[in-house]
Amino acid sequence: MARRQKTVITCAITGAIHTPTMSGALPFTPDDIASQAVAAAEAGASVLHLHARNPHDGSVSLDPEHFAAFLPRIKQATDAVVNISTGGSLKTAIEDRIAPAKRFSPEMCSLNMGSMNFSFHPLAKRYDNWTFDWEKDYVESSDGYIFRNTFRDIGTVAESLNPHDIKFEHECYDVGHLYNLKFCMDTGLFKPPIFIQFIFGILGGIGPEVDNLIFMKRTADRLFGEDYRWSVLGAGGAQMPLATTASQMGGNVRVGLEDSLFIARGKLAENNAQQVAKIRRIVEELGHDIATPEETREMLALKGGDRVAF
């Protein structure tokens, strides 16, 4: 009998795009980030992708002290793999973006594999009243953002974090990012097995069509052969459909309020765990098993939760 596929679920808890006005379910205090992360793990997420927020106004924060307010609580309450973002603010230097990871030495970190236009300004037209003063300008001004991830930046991240034995979630928003990653592997920055997150539906990146998923997967197969594992992030309304498709193609999945605020068309999710529970039900009903944290560590060749610094 063939061995059943193990699917890794990553849950992205809060992110850097959405604001408190857009959904009251979006966590930004340490209590809410910790409780939603733990609930997502209990629902089936073996990887927790984490950003920090300023607890006073919900804005994106790269202050390691804001991470320190919830990371130990998550580790104490769950065995899930912690994945810290090196994206964070779209307007901050790479040295500041990696400061939390350097301090806390997690098992995983996200790493964007190329510079790009990264905009969510159309969201500003959906809201008339904003909870905090910073929100409207932050969203409207994103049409002028360039998310900087030069080869020098990528090299800085690798040289700073490779000594921590951190596995990267290589975020690829378009096919060119796969070639950037191949170049970096050829020059010795990253060693297999690598973990690629195919990202679809962000304005500035590749669109959320199944044809694009097949194209990205076929390109990665050609470039990396057996030396990679992969997952899919579909933004907004593409979240569940693309995750479902990816799971049936042999891939892993990512959900969470960072990527979509909704649980169904026109219906806001109540929390991150609700999205995890939905994709878990879909994946299991279609015949696959959900990977445990221990199985995820083995699949991705992670260093283990006993070697983090929180």
Image: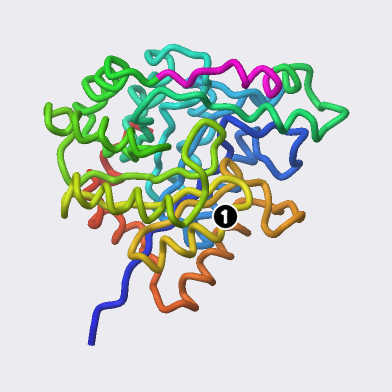
The residue sitting at 12% across, 32% down in the picture is 186
Q: Is residue 181 left or right of residue 47?
A: left
Which of the image's four quarters has the C terminus?
Answer: top left
The residue sitting at 74% across, 41% down in the picture is 23
Horizontal and vertical percent for residue 126? Answer: 80, 35
Question: Which residue is nearer to you in this view: 205 or 65?
Answer: 205
The residue sitting at 24% across, 57% down in the picture is 299
Specify the farthest residue to the bottom: 1
Find disc 1 in the rendering and name its residue.
39
Horizontal and vertical percent for residue 304? Answer: 26, 46
> Is most of the magenta stretch helix, strand or loop?
helix
Horizontal and vertical percent for residue 95? Answer: 37, 13
Q: Is residue 35 visible?
A: no
Q: Is residue 153 above or below residue 19?
A: above
Q: Is residue 198 above or below residue 244?
A: above
The range drawn in magenta is 138-148
Q: Is residue 139 found inside the magenta-colored segment of the image?
A: yes
Q: Is residue 114 above or below residue 253?
A: above
Identify which amino acid the numbered label 1 is placed on: Ala
* Other residues around mark 1 within 10 Å, as few (<14) / some (14–19) / many (≥20): many
User: Total of numbered circles in the picture?
Assistant: 1
Q: Quadrant of residue 94?
A: top left
Question: Which residue is nearer to you in this view: 190 or 113?
Answer: 113
Q: Is residue 147 visible?
A: yes
Q: Is residue 4 found inside the magenta-colored segment of the image?
A: no
Horizontal and vertical percent for residue 260? Answer: 62, 46
The residue sitting at 56% across, 17% down in the picture is 145
